[in-house]
């Protein structure tokens, strides 16, 4: 009968550990990226045992109780919730973010990141740096320090479009921003004046800067309502102080027409290249899962694809806390977001815990009943032993 006590105690011990697992699941209901653990039990059974073993048909076999099974991690997708951080990341579907700390590599399903004092994109509260795929398709930490400014680009072309009324006497386009090689900004105005009856369909083009000084002039002619190709491009050259000589082409060939519309013309600058120097204003991840820098001059820069790891058997990952895992099995393959079956990376979102409270409470009731039954076995066995002790001396 002592064996029955040990069997009952094995049940109490196993159910206690099951209660601990469920308690941990419930406690992490609101932990971002938390994955619930399953509660499993397995029997302990000996063949050919003695003591509490019972005779079977042709063999001696006996149950030795129960043990708490190895818990498995439930990697099903948690809900994605909107957040305010440009570098709050989550994976929709399969895959894990790759985080580096020197030679150490860990993995996460979601996390809040920010550029640290050294310029690396780091998981908040840790030293783990976000991995980005390099040319060799390896995950390497990303540093944005070298990209905190955007160099200026001198303007080389101004493309105009719209209608110049053939019955008007003038037309103009104002506030055209032009940049030199240093990024200094000038404001140009393009003014057109009709040549008059002596030269119909012909216009004098004058380009002036913000001081009113003329920086270029030419003649524009129309053949019917279409720009004469020989006059469609006007090159304006100037020498800004302290900068390289500036040569800008005014292109009238991209949709400039001349129809009668009274005194109203719709001429406008359709596009102007060039821009001034810019400073970094935002570090984020775009819809393609690539780190993108945004500058004050409106420019963007792509620094590469965030690395995602795919494992054939995710159960070989071990929790290390803070929503992080380390790999105890073969190396996973590294891919970009959304390719070859990999999940899609979502920015400004965090993955919530996947704990199902209804399932946890259901398991909790079963564990309570199992513990109660096991303790009852111990209690009954103890009563029977007491009865044996009471038989002493009875004839």
Image (cartoon, rainbow, N blue to C red):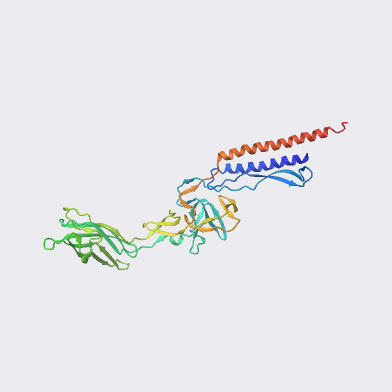
Badge count? 0
Does residue 304 sit above or below 18 in this rendering?
below
Location of residue 102 in the rendering, given as x and y in whole percent from the top left corner = 56, 60
Instruction: Please identify the quadrant where the C terminus is shown.
Output: top right
Location of residue 89 in the rendering, given as x and y in whole percent from the top left corner = 48, 51
* Picture quadrant of residue 3: top right
In this view, which residue lies farthest toward the front? 57
Give the camera-side residue of 188 and 339: 339
Residue at 76% over, 36% down: 381
329 relative position to 216: left or right: right
* Picture quadrant of residue 187: bottom left
105 relative position to 220: left or right: right
Residue at 74% over, 34% down: 380
Location of residue 29 in the rendering, given as x and y in whole percent from the top left corner = 55, 42
Does residue 260 sit above or below 245 in this rendering?
above
Give the camera-side residue of 203 and 380: 380
Location of residue 39 in the rendering, given as x and y in whole percent from the top left corner = 62, 44
């Amino acid at each position: 009968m002592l064996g029955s006590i040990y069997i009952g105690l094995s049940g109490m011990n196993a159910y206690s550990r099951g209660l601990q697992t469920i308690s941990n699941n419930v406690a992490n209901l609101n932990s971002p990226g938390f994955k619930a653990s399953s509660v499993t039990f397995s029997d302990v059974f000996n063949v050919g045992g003695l003591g509490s073993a019972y005779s079977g048909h042709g063999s001696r076999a006996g149950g030795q109780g129960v043990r708490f099974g190895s818990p498995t991690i439930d990697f099903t997708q948690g809900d994605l919730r909107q957040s305010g951080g440009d570098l709050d990341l989550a994976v929709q579907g399969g895959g894990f973010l790759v985080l580096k700390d020197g030679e150490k590599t860990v993995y996460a399903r979601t996390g809040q990141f920010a550029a640290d004092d050294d310029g690396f994109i780091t998981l908040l509260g840790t030293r783990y740096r976000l991995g980005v795929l390099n040319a060799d398709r390896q995950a390497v930490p990303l540093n944005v320090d070298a990209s905190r400014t955007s160099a200026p680009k001198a303007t080389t072309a101004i493309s105009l479009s719209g209608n110049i009324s053939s019955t008007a006497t003038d037309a103009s386009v104002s506030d055209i921003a032009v940049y030199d090689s240093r990024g200094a900004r000038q404001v140009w105005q393009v003014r057109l004046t009709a040549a008059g009856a002596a030269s119909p369909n012909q216009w004098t083009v004058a380009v002036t800067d913000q001081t009113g000084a003329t920086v270029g002039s030419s003649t524009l002619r129309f053949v019917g309502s279409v720009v004469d190709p020989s006059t469609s491009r006007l090159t304006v050259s100037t020498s800004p102080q302290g900068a390289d000589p500036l040569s800008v082409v005014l292109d009238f060939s991209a949709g400039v027409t001349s129809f009668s519309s009274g005194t109203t013309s719709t001429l406008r600058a359709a596009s102007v290249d060039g821009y001034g120097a810019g400073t970094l204003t935002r570090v984020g991840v775009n819809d393609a899962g690539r780190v993108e820098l945004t500058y004050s001059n409106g420019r963007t820069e792509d620094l590469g694809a965030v690395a995602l790891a795919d494992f054939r058997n995710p159960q070989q990952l071990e929790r290390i806390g803070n929503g992080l895992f380390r790999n105890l099995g073969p190396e996973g393959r590294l891919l970009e977001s959304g390719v070859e079956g990999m999940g899609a990376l979502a920015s400004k979102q965090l993955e919530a815990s996947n704990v199902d409270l209804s399932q946890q409470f259901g398991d909790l009731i079963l564990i309570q009943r199992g513990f109660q039954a096991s303790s009852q076995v111990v209690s009954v066995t103890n009563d029977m032993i007491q009865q044996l002790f009471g038989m002493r001396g009875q004839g």
